[in-house]
Image: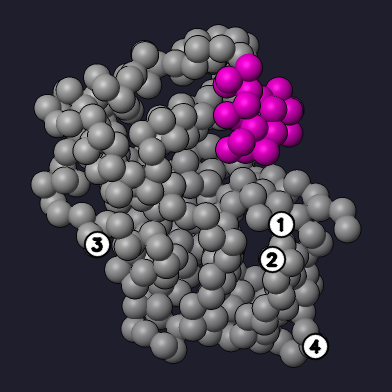
Amino acid sequence: MQIEIEKVDKTDVRLPIKTYIVDTNERRLHSEPHIHNEIEIIYMMNGSMEFVVEDQQTVVNAGDIIIINSMTAHWSNKLNEEYSKMCLLQFNISLIYENNVHFNPYLASFIHKSNFKFNIMHVKDKPEYNRFADTLIKIAKEFKAKDTAYDIAIMSYIYMLFVIMYRENILKSTAESINRTDDHTLDRISEVLNHIQTNYGDSIKVKDVSEMLNINYSYFCRLFKKATGRTFIEYLNYYRISIAKKRLLQDKATVTEIILDTGFSSFSYFNRIFKRYTGFSPTTYRKLFGSEQSEAS
């Protein structure tokens, strides 16, 4: 089975997302096996569809919401000829933390503990799930209308989706470590995350950060992993790679320049970490996804 790499249309440079409401009167609801960098959320408003996510098969009925993680191969097909209608949203997780001035540990925990393939919510089960579905529809309508400050409205709605996922523990382990972490600890971890966001291009050592907080090295390592779900180095690498990905798509700097600017010590190490998080080499990633940016400009 051939899996295609799907690219989200980013002609709207203010808000690089894909969202719409569509039914079978407009087009056939069907997709070939594909993969993309974006999280995909689909609310089935009417009818039903079959989804195959990696090697798992599931049916999404009216009133169901399916959340498919980024870089997860999937395809869909209608089960019958009945009328069907759905609301779709695709967005890259980087949209969240790149628009968050004070990078907080709740977002960090979601980003780094979201190793799920897919999840399904049944709207009728909880009022919050119904609110989630309503928010998806609002996003699609705002994006289509593009009224004044639509991008601000949509970002607020996307944040609301994350709030619901947190509070309802939709993505399982995501909320577990946060619920066991007190506010004082979260404040200290938030300080570290903001330090990384400001100084990612410099040499940052775990020892220096623990001393900055005036706490024991080993204790800091345990604390950080409990709050974010990743070791300090894993998190630092992830954040640096997120910046590198953005620059590969948005400016003409060479890979070497990007390596130096994002704090990596060598090309081989950068290449290895980049491929671990994206599945591609930096050069291939730029060729595959960079065309979207040039088409939008």
- Give the label, 4 or 2, closer to the camera: 2
Regarding residue 198, the answer to whether it shows in the image is no
Q: Quadrant of the C terminus?
A: top right
The reply to whether dot 1 and dot 2 touch (C-beta < 8 Å) is yes
Range shown magenta? 268-297
Q: Main secondary structure of the magenta part?
A: helix
Residue 145 locus on image (x, y percent): 49, 58
Please give the name of the residue rendered at 71% of the width and 57% of the height, measured from the top-left corner. Answer: 73
- Give the label, 3 or 1, closer to the camera: 3
Query: Residue 73's mark?
Result: 1
- Which of the 4 quarters of the picture holds residue 263? top left
* Residue designated by label 4: 81
Between 157 and 118, which is closer to the camera in this rendering? 118
Residue 55 locus on image (x, y percent): 74, 67
Query: Residue 179's mark?
Result: 3
* Residue designated by label 2: 53
User: Marks 4/3: CA distance?
Assistant: 45 Å
Please give the name of the residue rendered at 45% of the width and 74% of the height, measured from the top-left corner. Answer: 133
- Which of the 4 quarters of the picture holds residue 24? bottom right
- 269 in magenta: yes
Label 4 vs 3, first from the N-terminus: 4
- Which of the 4 quarters of the picture holds residue 61? bottom right
Please give the name of the residue rendered at 88% of the width and 58% of the height, measured from the top-left corner. Answer: 1
